[in-house]
Structures are given as structure tokens and as C-alpha cells.
Amino acid sequence: MTAAETQILLNELQSKIDKLPTKGTLKALEFRLDAILQANLDTFWLLICAILVFLMQAGFMCLESGLSRNKNSINVALKNVTDFGIAVVVFWAFGFALMYGTSVSGLFGNKFFFFTTKVAGYQTYFVFQAMFVATAATIISGAVAERLKFFSYIIITFLASGFFYPIVGHWSWAFNFENPEEKFGWLGQLGYLDFAGASVVHSVGGWIALSVLLIVGNRTGRFREDDTKKSFQGSNTPIAALGALILWFGWFGFNGGANGAMDLKIPLILINTFLSASFGLIFSSIMGILILKKPEPLFMITGPLAGLVSITASCAYVDPADAILIGSIGGIVSGSTIVLLEKVKIDDVVSAIPVHLACGIWGTIAVALFGNFEMMGVEKTRLEQLYIQLIGIGSIGSFCFFGSYIIFKTINSFFPLRVSKIQEELGLNISEHNASTDTHELLEVLTKQAKSEDYSSRAPQDPFTDSGIIGTQYNVLMNKLEQSEKQKNKWKNRVSQEIKLAMNVQKRLMPKRDIENYPIFGLNIPAREISGDFYDFYLHDDEVYFTLSDVSGKGVNAGMVMAKAITLFKIFAKQKFKPNEILLEMNNDLKETNPVGTFITSIVGRYNMKSDLVEIANAGHQPALLKIRKEFKEFPSSSMPLAVTKHKDESVYQLESFKLNGGRIYCFTDGFSECMDDKKQEIGIEGVKELLLKHENVSLKKELEDATEEIRLKSLKKGTIERGIKENNDILDDDLTIIGIGK
């Protein structure tokens, strides 16, 4: 009906009213007309609000997809589409009946199954509540994203929307449609108040999400055994922020529609809604800055949602000043809960539990703390109302958490809710929906190429997609790399000859003096032609200076640094410097001359054969081992490696002094400790100890030769033993260097 037609109708009604004989009849007609107009306005308002709440589903989809990794974003989006349809169907079939049907002992309803009533008021209310149930179900999706089977989530949605939400809704909201003042549910009769569903909607979803998270566990790699966390970057933070804005917008329908009528309460409800959201944003952002020293996106995105959930229960009962306080505290509650979940290692992808559960609880409590009792029609004290609110929180939480945990734990025993590790690593887009992306296709090609080392393979090209453009540029790079590889091969023989010359020079730097009268012995087996490991001895009459070092890297660069380090050691050993003094002088000189990024781990020691005293200093190297009989003592590093930074005095290198007492001391490089055992695990320092004990009771030379040979055989690269290769070079994983002092 147009405005002109409406005006004509009103004019006709006024003409008829003017002709009526009595004022009583006139008032009756006016009242009836006002009632019809109000009913139409109420219906229109509730349907508009229902549409706004429906729009929130799109907000949830954007939020969850944006905060999930790209390989799972399609799966998350499809869950949000599917759970809405399933929730509405289930709610139509029996959810609405359980929630608003004639009450059975205040626990559940038993009327309106397969909802078909023709009463417009009932139909309107069904539409609005159907939007609510979809919201409760989709809260769970974001929390458990990236690890749940698609059909597992359908089961969860079915039970959340068809059982848990309707039952809780009946407890809190059920009323007699013929007499709205008559409450059906036991919580409603008790006086429990939750205007728009802080607990009835949001906490229900939060409690169920928490139980499912505890059952299925965290995403693989999210938390490590060393108590550190790994941040997973969402696929699209701007889309997540858009989702938060859509939810913010839709929340006006969420809270405004809960009023059930188009009246003068609406402006206050809307004012409280956007004020609480705004201050939730501000205080959550402050929490992020205080904790992470920067405006953290997750805290900023979830902040307004925290404020919205917090005000949901009381938006019609408080003043704007109270709404500001409620929203501010909600932002703090949400931010604190995010930190708490990190500490207890619960992996909530979108922070659904901090926002919907924690803030839902806070918002329900806030009704008793800040609510205007006159507006609420309550004749209790605040303490009495708080007690009732806590009963509601406890009963809803117990029913939803423990009930869902028992049900889903049982289902999980027969039908695992979680995808396999391989499926999770692949991504649910592909493993659950076979929905490959151009990015995945590109990565698949690159992975195969990396494994095959085939430079002739090329990535797919497409000028109309980002991945296709990357593939094009990658192929250009591979063309140049292939040409470069051919050019490199031309120089291979020449470089090989030069390396052989450098190798001969390095061999000449190793100890060649007659040391038979000294209880010392050393071995060096390089993994390449040129070793980064070295050892040396410097002999005085009654003393022997010794060193063992490992230069970072391999090849010519390491060999040149090694030559410089050996030279410096000999210079300062000749002057009878203490071991820690030698390390200081070597460090400061190498810091000035070494290539950037090159460092040396080093042990320097001195053994006096008359006094049997050993002095040793360790700069970032593997621990030296003192073996007396079958007992070992470790002398670990006391400082960082050489050539990292300059030092003012030798005190930075701790000097250890001890008697040898018939024992032997050993120094070795990581080629020993990082050797793999039969279980493909590093033997470590304890494995080296076992190796030395295994070959004891022989001369020092024999002991080190046998131990080194065993390690060498374990360290041969795959296939070398089968081919009968016995050469040392290019078949070991790492250089093998060891020295020993003792009889």
C-alpha cells in the first residue's frame, strides 16, 4: 500500500469515526486501530532484525575464513553456509518445539513440532529465533577450525541447534504465547534475566566449543614441547576485520530484535550496543598493546565483539554510562582470556571462547551488577539477583559443557571427529572437499621440483591469477638458473684442481712434529676436501698446549679461517699465555679479520706433565670430557664462540684447572656427537661417552683411531658402503676431529 492509499484509508476511517454516536465507541475504534498499527510495526521490526541477524552469518564466515590459514579457508566458509541450513531445518523440525512448546516441568517444550502454525505472530517469532540458533551453532565452527571433519561438524551442529540451544532457551526464555508474562522455563520462573542471549546463545556455543577443543586437541604444531607457541597466520586479516564489522552491524538486529516490539526502548538498546562495542574495541586493543607491545590485529578484531557479547544480556536494562563500563570490562575479559588460553595451550582459532564464553558469562553477571531493577521489573536485591544469575550460568555451563563432552567423547570413540595428520597438513580444502587452489598447484610443482632437483621442470603459468603470475616469474628464474648451472659446470674441473691445492696446504698445517714422548694424539677426517675443523699441539719441555676448534661452514672459506686460527694459537702458545688469554687474543684478532657471519667454537688447554695439572678454557664448543676410570666429568662452554664480538679481558672465558690423576681428557667436534645411531637419532654427548668406554683399555692412539673409525662408518652417506667406497672426502655428513691427552 502506498502512502497516498494509506492516507485515503485513514481519511475514510476518520469520516466513519466522526459519524459514530458515542465517545466510547470512538475510543474503542481508535484503540483497535492503534493496536493493528503497532502489531504491524512490531512484526516489521522483528523481521528486519531477523534479516540483520542472518547477515551476521556472513560476518562469521568472513571472520573465521580470514583468521584461518588459506589451505582451510574454503572448508570454513562451507561450514558456515552448511550449519545455517542444518540449524534452521533442525530448529523447524523439533528445536522450536523443545524451546517454546508447552512446558514439561520447566525443562523442555512438547508442542510446535514441524512448525506449521498459520499465526503470524508465531511465524515471526520462529523466523527470528531461527537466526539465533544459527548463531549459536556457528560459534563452534571458528573455535575448532582447521582440524575437524566436515561430517563431524554437521553432527555437532545438529546436536547444538536441535538439543542444547533449545533446552537452554526453554529454561530461560519460554513463555505462554497467549500470556507473555507467564514464564514456562524453570530459570525464567526463578527470575533469571538474559535479554538477548549472552548466556543462552553465546555461552552455549562457547561451552560446546570448549568441550570439542578438549576432545580433538590443538592444530598440529600450534604449541611445542618447550612451552613456546607457533603463530599461524590467517589467510586474510582484512576479510576477518570485515567480518567483525558485519557482525557489529548485525548485532543491532540481534539486540534490537530481542525486544520483540518496536517501541521507545529501541533507541536505548541500540545506543548501549554500539557504545559497549566501541569501548570493548578500545580496551581490548590496549590489552594487545600492553601484552605484545603493538596493536595486535586479533585483539582489535575481537574487541568490539567482546563488547557486544558483554552488553547482550543487559542492553535494555542499563544506562549508556553502565554500557560503557560493561563493554570496557568485556574487552579486558576477552584479552585476558586470550592470554590464558595461550598459557594452558588451548588452540582457539578465532578466540570464540574469550569472546562468546568468557564475555557471555561476564555479561550475564553484569545484569545483576548494573541493571536498572525498575526497568527489569525486579523486586529483589542485587545480591539476590546475582545469585540467580550465577545459578543460570552454572546450570547452563554444566549442561552444555559436560553434556556435549560426554556425547562427543563417546562419538569420537567410534567415529573420530578429527581429520588425520596427513589430511591436516594437506589442508581441509583439498582433503575434505577436493577444492584445490592455484596456490596449492604451484606449491605442488615446486615441492616435486625440490625433491627431484630437476631444473627443467616448470611451474604452471596464468596471467590472470596471482599464483599464475608467480609461476611465470619463477619459470624465468629457473631458465636463468639452468643456464647458470651449465656455466658452472664449465668451471667445475678448474675449481676442483684449485681445491686440491688448498687441501694440500691445509694438511701441512696440521701437527707434524715428533710427539711420541708426549701423552697426546689427534685425528682429523674432513667431510670435504677442505675441513673447517682443526687441532694443534704446541710443545714445551714439560708442557703441551693443545687446541681443537670448529669453524662455521665448510669449504675454502672455512679452511682459510682455520689457517689463520692455527697461526694465532701457535703465536700465543709459544709465549706461554694461559688458555683463556689465548682465546681472548684469538677472538679479538679474528673479529677484525674474519668474513662477516663466520665464527669459531674453540677449546684451548695446557697440560703440565710434571704437576699433572690441566688448564682448559671453552669458547662455545662441545664440552671437553675428563674420564677417570669409568666416570666422566664435563667441562662445557662458558662463553660465546670466537669472532662474534670483542672482549676487554680474558675473564669472559672461564679457566678450569684439575689434575689428570691417571685419566684422559678428550675434545671433539660435533661430527661425533651428531652422528646418527641405528634409530636415526643423534648419539649426543652420552653416546660419545659410551663409544669411548667401548674402546678403552688400549693405548690413547688406538682408542681414538677405533672410536673415529666406528663413527666414520656410521656417518657414511647412503649407498657409499654398498659401493665399497673407502675415501674420506665427500661421503661424510660432517668433519670428524678428536684429540686426547693422557697415558
Image (tube, rainbow, N blue to C red):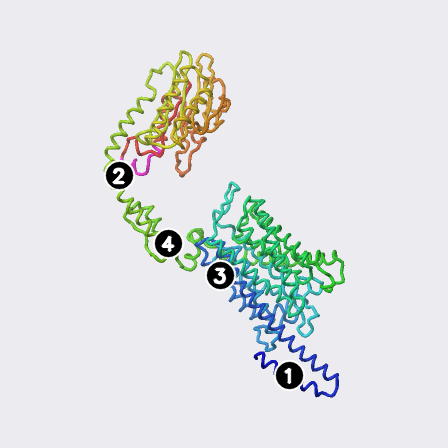
Whether the residues at callouts 3 and 4 have beta carbons within 8 Å, the answer is: no
Residue to which mark 1 is pinned: 11
User: x, y (%) of residue 536?
Assistant: 37, 21
Dot 2 amino acid type: Lys
Query: In the picture shown, does residue 569 fall above or below 500?
Result: above
What whole-number distance in Å separates the C-alpha atoms at marks 3 and 2?
A: 53 Å
Whether the residues at callouts 4 and 2 have beta carbons within 8 Å, the answer is: no
- Secondary structure of the residue carrying numbered label 2: helix
- Secondary structure of the residue carrying numbered label 1: helix
Using the image as rendered, state which of residue 743 and residue 24 is in the foreground: 24
What whole-number distance in Å separates the C-alpha atoms at marks 4 and 1?
A: 67 Å
Q: In this view, does 446 lie to the left or right of 187?
A: left
Q: Residue at x 60, y 57 (%)?
A: 277
Query: In the picture shown, does residue 731 fall above or below 196?
Result: above
Per the rendered image, the range of residues in magenta is 713-723
Dot 4 amino acid type: Ser
